[in-house]
Image (spheres, rainbow, N blue to C red):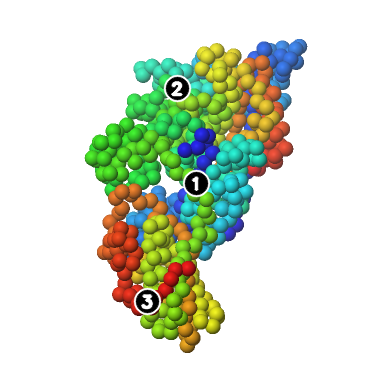
Amino acid sequence: MRAEACVIHVNIVGFMAAVETLSDPERRGKAFVVGFPGASRALVLDASRDALAEGIRIGMGLEAARALVRGLAVVPPSFDDYRRANAVVEEICARYAPHIENDSGGHFYLDLGGTRRLFGEYIDSAAKIKNDIRSTVGLEPAIGLARNKLVAKVGTRSLRPDGLVLVREGDEAAFLAPQDVELLSGVGPKILRILRAVGMREIGELAGVGAEECRALLGKGGPELRDAARGLDSREVADGRLAQRVIARELRFDSDVLDAFEVRAALLRLVEESGLELRRGAFVAGRLSLRVTYTDGFESSASCACARPLSGEAELVRAADGLVVKVGERRVRVRALRFAQSALSPSSPQIDLFAPPEPSKLERLQRAVDAARTRFGSDKLGLCAALGRAAYSRV
Amino acid sequence: MTATQPQPCEIRVGTSGYDYPEWKAAFYPQALRRKDFLSFYTQRFDTVELNFSYYGMPRAKTLAELVEAAGSGCLFSLKGNRSFTHEVDPARWRESLAEYRSALAPLISAGRLGAVLLQFPQSFHYEPERRRYLAELLGELAELPVVVEFRNMGWYNNRVFDALRERGVGLVSLDLPKLRGLPPTVDLVTAPTAYIRFHGRNAETWRSGDAALRYGYLYSDEELESWIERVKDIAGKAVRLLIYFNNHFNGAAPLNAAMFKRLLGDAGAGPGAAP
């Protein structure tokens, strides 16, 4: 927690829908959702304000959404547009903030600490950032300014869809107390049901509960959530522009390899490891790339923009196989491989901190595998196809 | 993708009250008669917030005379009477409110009502009975441009913000001392009419109980400049923005109001200009 209120949360509510409205102003004032209309178990990825007003919620099934609004327009996501808009907003933030954490999807944390002499009071910078985003991109952010990320974020959620709030130093708990408890990060549908069942509706009610009661009610993470309700948050603004972050794995064969089966086995191990890191960070990747270095020093690369962001191992493997085809076949021994995931974005806008929503069977399997790999090591449980004989070392 | 053009917003700057003999020399000429204060004032400012309506029930005749004296173009914002903000008698507040509303007729018919300001004290807590009361009060004033100022932090929450939006009631943005326990700084446009009040920044004397010490504050150029971007932000969403200086002791309010008008003009966001 900073000594002064210099941490900003920029929250562009309904980011995808807002960008889609900018792309086609005819959508303004209409109920529409963003999603993959043809996909099985398709979900609402985002919804316009008018759609939200009709009771549609992000994360609900498309069919359920259609049942609420007859003739509901479903717009396929334009991830490139979202990335572009996100990058412009990030550049605006970078004019004022030395430290930016880009969580993509219209969410940014900024640490303005030490910039007062350059740009004036922190709230002035916050207002400038807000105005610059509106005049440059046409998006309306909510902006929260507080001593830590948690309070700044509750601030923007309380204002939604837009506005500006400064929570003074020392007033964090008092500001949080009357807000709806679901505004607190980590309170998703399951925890909310528990809290509602015991009559807790406001953050202040959770803040007043003892650690043991919290543990009994919410499990071992309960006291942590209770501390959050008191406005306590020691997380720093993690300096990192998400769109520029890359999760990559690279290996070099001890002896150059010609056998395509062995090359694929090694590649799949890279996919397993980098995918695990991706999912542990709760990210999805919008872009994948593969670089193959041959024994003659020649390098061949291929990359692909994913039609929709990926994180599951099965889909990453399919995409990696596609990259192998794109790289093309050379009857030359392979010396090294590099597999990279980029254009990252958060996998879900809001999940329970301790009790995630009901996953599909494949998702449950993936989580079990990831949990086992996290506990016992990523080489202890893997795909059969990744079990090759060729020896290699990490680069 | 292209940014949309902001709606033009009518921005007006004035003071909280105008009838202060102590403003002579600082603002009014020494020789100016008190009955000519408003005429002099409206040559410089195009809006005024009337506070006498808080202490005593306003009368239609008085307000009609003010409209007449102000000449054309001045908007009046009227503070709610204490009988329905600070000293609420459950048995009588509706009667008081009816009397108050009927007094507004000359302002409404002349198109000179800026807003009705309902300012609630620190002791007006966010609790069920008062929430119900506020809902009823706002319901009674539904057809008027109403703005609310809360001094108790409990009201600054998401449910209240949503309720104000639904009712088209404005939330006053405040400039206050940096003191723990005072309302958070919130710029949130919840109605076509947005409203800003400058109360001064006397942190040490704010809770002294002495109004002169509390509101005797002169803003610096730098302090007011820092508001320009916030005004632009608010004006980007409101149809009308009313800005009042309540630091009335020693004539600081009109000085600061004039300074702020100049600063807004220099920034291209002045009264009458699109942000």
Q: Position of residue B273 (x, y in %)?
A: 68, 40
Q: Give SS at disc 3.
A: helix
Are callouts 2 and 1 both on one chain?
A: no
Question: Mark 1 = which residue?
Answer: A237
| Residue B198 visible from this viewpoint | yes
Q: Position of residue B134 (x, y in %)?
A: 40, 28
Q: Nearer the viewer, residue A390 or A105?
A: A390
Amino acid type of the residue that numbered disc 2 sits on in the rendered structure: Gln
Report crowding for label 1: few under 14, some 14 to 19, many 20 or more residues within 10 A (C-alpha): some
User: Above or below — where is A299 with respect to B20?
Assistant: below
User: Above or below — where is B193 with respect to B107?
Assistant: below
Q: Chain of mark 1?
A: A
Q: Chain of mark 3?
A: A
Are callouts 3 and 1 both on one chain?
A: yes
Amino acid type of the residue that numbered disc 1 sits on in the rendered structure: Val
Res B138 quadrant in image: top left
Q: Earlier in the sequence, mark 3 or mark 1?
A: 1
Question: Mark 2 = which residue?
Answer: B122
Q: Nearer the viewer, residue A307 or A256?
A: A256
Amino acid type of the residue that numbered disc 3 sits on in the rendered structure: Ala
Residue A143 horizontal side relative to residue A154, left or right = right
Question: Mark 3 = which residue?
Answer: A265
Q: CA distance from mark 2 to mark 1?
A: 35 Å
Q: Position of residue A374 (x, y in %)?
A: 33, 59
